[in-house]
Amino acid sequence: MKAKNFVQRIKERNRYATNRREPFYDLAGKYLPKDKDKIVIDIGSGYGFFADYLKLRDKFKNTVLLDADPEVVGKIKNSINYKAPDKLPFENNSVAYIHCSHLIEHLETKDFFILLREMDRVLAQDGVLILSAPLLDYMFYEGLAHIRPYGPEGIIHYMCKKDEKEKKKTIAGADGGFVSDKYVVEDLVYRYVKNLGDSELGSRFLIISIGVAIIKKIFSKLGFYKYSKNGFTLILRKQ
């Protein structure tokens, strides 16, 4: 069993060592509701690549794409204007499925917290919340649009809290409290980047530094990589 799990982890790591979104869309697609009348939304939809890839608008008549880009709103089918973290245009407990990919890293901490509460407000019992985002790596601040990385551990901390004592501590904190204790983690996969690292090993002896650099180049040519986590997809279910 351990050997099987080990091989499975290697396969999963290789599958998600990509900047392509499709493997993560495939994962998200496994959690779509069976009832085709349910409300399915994509927050920060952009041009609707996620909806197009999974043919959501053909499968679910209540598919809604939310985005603030005027190039998208009104020009893409089922799209409406929405800027996070404004109030979501849905009734309490009315949405069955929320997909939100590569949006939260553009928000300040307070705004992200408000958005989490809004998503919790509209999501129905047994509904699914899917969040995808980059993690901090050497590429994160390449552009000015990224404000802050948010890891899955922090999201789980605020959405799946069970311990009453810990809740009280959090509520008393400067962040204004937790979001919910009703969620469970259905799945968590990381996106990886393959390299041998940006740090350079060296020595005060020049010959050793040269030798280390040569070994690193040889390892790279032979296909050896260091797998570094640089993104994630977290899938939560509301109980």
Image (tube, rainbow, N blue to C red):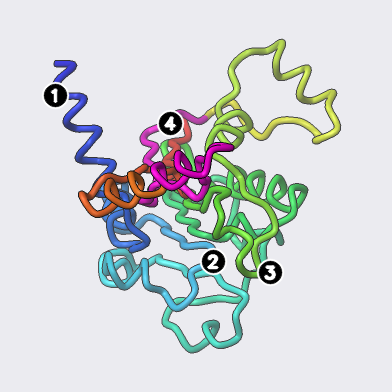
Quarter residue 39 falls in: bottom left
Q: CA distance from mark 1 to mark 4?
A: 22 Å
Residue 208 drawn at (x, y percent): 45, 39
Dot 3 crowding, Cα within 10 Å, few <14, some 14–19, many 20+:
few
Q: CA distance from mark 2 to mark 1?
A: 37 Å
* Span colored in magenta: 183-212
Q: Which mark is residue 144?
A: 3
- Earlier sequence position, callout 2 versus callout 1: 1
Q: Is residue 92 in view?
A: yes
Identify residue type, mark 3: Leu
Residue 229 drawn at (x, y percent): 44, 43
- Earlier sequence position, callout 1 versus callout 4: 1
Classify 164 as above or below 84: above
- Earlier sequence position, callout 3 versus callout 4: 3
Can you identify the residue that label 1 sits on? 4
Q: Residue at x 79, y 25 (%)?
A: 171
Q: Considering depth in this image, is 204 or 109 the residue closer to the camera?
A: 204
Q: CA distance from mark 2 to mark 4?
A: 22 Å
Circles 2 and 1 in contact, beta carbons < 8 Å: no
Q: Nearer the viewer, mark 1 or mark 4?
A: 1
- Earlier sequence position, callout 2 versus callout 4: 2
Circles 3 and 4 in contact, beta carbons < 8 Å: no
Can you identify the residue that label 2 sits on? 44
Circles 2 and 3 in contact, beta carbons < 8 Å: no
In terms of secondary structure, where does tag 2 sit? loop
Dot 2 crowding, Cα within 10 Å, few <14, some 14–19, many 20+:
many
